Each structure stands twice: as structure tokens, then as C-alpha cells.
Image: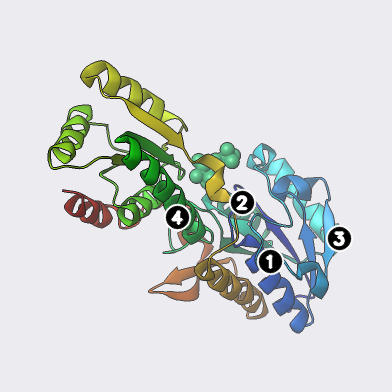
Amino acid sequence: MSFAHIGLLCSGGDSPGMNCAIRALVRTAIFNGIQVTGIKRGYAGLLRGEFQPMNLSSVGNIIQRGGTILQTSRCPEWMKKEFRAKAVDIMKHQGIEALVVIGGDGSFNGAMALWNEHQFPVIGIPGTIDNDISGTEYTIGFDTAVQTGIECVDKIRDTAHSHARTFLVEVMGRNSSAIALKVGVCTGAENILLPHEKVNHQKLNDDIHRGMARGKDSSIIIVAEGPVAGRSYEIQNILKDMFHLDAHVAILGHVQRGGSPTANDRFIASQMGNKAVQALIDEKFPTVTVVRDGKVLLAPLSECITKADYNYAEYQTLAETLSI
Ligand code: F6P
């Protein structure tokens, strides 16, 4: 079976570098004589038939832009079987023979259901700043989000030092430790609070005072957001009530989702977009373009549909050792 026409969508939270993957996929497909239809606003747009024909120039001048030109959404209807059946009918009616989904584990679960229920050919490209998908060491956008986090914390450190203050800096990543650990190590944070660990406020206070005792003027505590953003305020209140310690809160939030992708994100996304088309030409589906041992490869989609928190124990030890 060779494909003449494929569909492409982004789903879930956007991430810097998605445009690089879109560009690489469209250009590789056209190079191989395959037509591409862009589907706007993820699975929700697919259900509404929001299609956009893609040509060489529709992906021109986007490699440096954050976000996604196709836009994205989270789609609760997709959880229901009848909507997935409707989507397959819509794609067939449009002449779309295979679907490439750029997104996270939730989006890949949605793609897996399309394959399981309808044998509709699907390929996944991992795109989320959280770097939390099983089966791949890397997801597009993580490097840029970390870089943005580092730049923000460096700025906060300047003012924290000037005023001899403690800051709780909350970073995105939901239940993943990845952004918090990497930003923490790279900014010399005094402490990193991970999403799955109960906060030991006594230890936090002791660490801050130990630092002050050896002449430190500022303390940066990186707080991983966990399931609900804003947990830093609770920590701030407890530090105040228990120890009369005034900590300032800075929540970086969606700043980390925007911005021009780093070289690393551009390069990996370009390889993944290219590889996704190759996978369809070689009839290797349902698969995901993954990074393993630093190389972009294909892995079965079934290996990439759960959450993973890579290397956190090792990086946590590193962070703790370097922040004594
Ligand atoms: O999954 C990516 C992510 O940016 C998480 O880090 C964050 O918790 C969440 O999305 C925020 O989602 P939304 O943009 O829908 O508020």
C-alpha cells in the first residue's frame, strides 16, 4: 500500500518546534509525491472538518516560530468511540488515507484508538514541553522550555541577590520532574521540589538558613507545578506561618510554552517530520518517531502511550550534591 494523501494535526499543549516538524513532514511528503492536508485545532478541528491544503510555501518561514501554525486543542469528545468513528468517515470522505499526530501521550492514546478500532494508519511525533512520554528519551519543545526557564531564573536571581531574598520559582511540567530538574541544575537552584514528593518544609527552611550562614544572599527554590498550577503559594504560606520566612513566588507558566525553538528542537523536529513520512512509505505503522541513545528512530505506538519520568532519581542526586 502506498499513500497518496495524508493528514497532519497537532493535539494537546503546543510546544516550540512543532512548526519545524510540520515543515519537515510537508516538504518530505511533497518531495515523495504525497499530498498533505493540515487539520486545524487538533482532533476537535478534525471532527469539524477544518482542513487546510499544505504546499511548499505554506510551511515557508515557520521554522523559527514557536507555537503551531495548525493550532491545537484538547478534545474531550475524542474519548468517545462514536466521535472517533465519525472522524474516520470524515477523513475517508476527504481522501485522507493516513494520519500523523504531533502531541503528547494523551494524543497518542487517541491515535492508538483509531488504529485499534478502525485500522486507520497512524504515526505519532512526540511534541510536549514536559518530556514525559514512554518509549522516547525526548519530546519536541523540552529544550526550548528549559532554556526559557533558565533565562527567567537567571533574571530572578539578579533581583533576589540584590534584595537578599528567597524565591519559589514554579515551572511547568505537570507530573513530570524533567523541566524542574534540568532548570534547577542549570541555574544552581538551592532546592528543587518535585511533583510526586511531599514537601519537607522544615528541611527547606534549614537549607535556606544553612546557605545564609555561609554567606549566601539569595535562595532559588524550583517548584515543579504538579497536577494543579499554583502550589507555590501554599508552600509560601507554610514557610511564613511556621518559620516567619518571607519567600517570593514567581510562576513562569505559559511563558515556557512560547518562543523560538532552540537548535536542538529544530533539528530533532526536522528529523522526526522527515522520519514520519518515511515510516508511512515503508508501511511501518502504527509507530512513533522517538529518540533512543541520541538517534531518531521508529518505535511501536503501543510503547509510547503512557507517561514516563526519565532519569529523575539520577538528576535529583546531582542537584542535591551540587547545592550543598
Ligand atoms: O503538557 C504541557 C503543559 O504545558 C503542562 O506542562 C502544563 O501543566 C499544561 O500543559 C498546561 O495546560 P493548559 O495550557 O491547557 O493550561
Give how far across and how far down residue 25 sits, in percent: 68, 72
Quadrant in the picture for the N terminus: bottom right
- Residue at image point 34% right, 20% down: 237
Percent across and percent down for residue 298 are 51, 73
Which label's residue is closer to the chain start, 3 or 2?
2
Identify the element where label 4 is drawn.
Answer: helix
Marks 1 and 4 in Cβ contact (< 8 Å): no
Q: Reading the chain from its start, which is encountered first: label 4 or label 3?
A: 3
Q: CA distance from mark 4 to mark 2?
A: 15 Å
Do callouts 4 and 2 mark residues in contact (Cβ within 8 Å)? no
Determine whether the beta carbon of the residue marked 4 sits less than 8 angstroms from the nearest atom of ligand 1.
Answer: no
| Labelled pair 2, 1 in contact (Cβ < 8 Å) | no
Instruction: Indicate which disc, 2 or 1, sits on the residue closer to the N terminus.
Output: 2
Residue named by callout 2: 14
Q: Which residue is mark 3?
A: 94
- Marks 1 and 4 sit apart, C-alpha to C-alpha, by 22 Å
> Which of labels 4 and 2 is toward the front?
4
Numbered disc in front, either 1 or 3 = 1
Residue under label 1, please give it. 22
Measured from the top left, where is residue 324 in percent x and y?
15, 48
Q: Residue 303 appears at what percent x and percent y?
A: 46, 61
Circle 3 sits in a helix, a strand or a loop, which is it? helix
Ligand 1 image position (quadrant)? top right
Label 1 vs label 4, nearer the camera: 4
**Amino acid type assigned to the residue bearing label 1 in the image:** Ile
Amino acid type of the residue that numbered disc 3 sits on in the rendered structure: Gln
Residue under pointer 4: 146
Question: Considering the numbered disc 2 on the image, is that residue within a helix, a strand or a loop?
Answer: loop
Q: Amino acid at mark 4?
A: Val
Residue at x-position 60% and y-position 60% = 260
Q: Residues within 10 Å of mark 1 (few under 14, many from 20)?
A: many
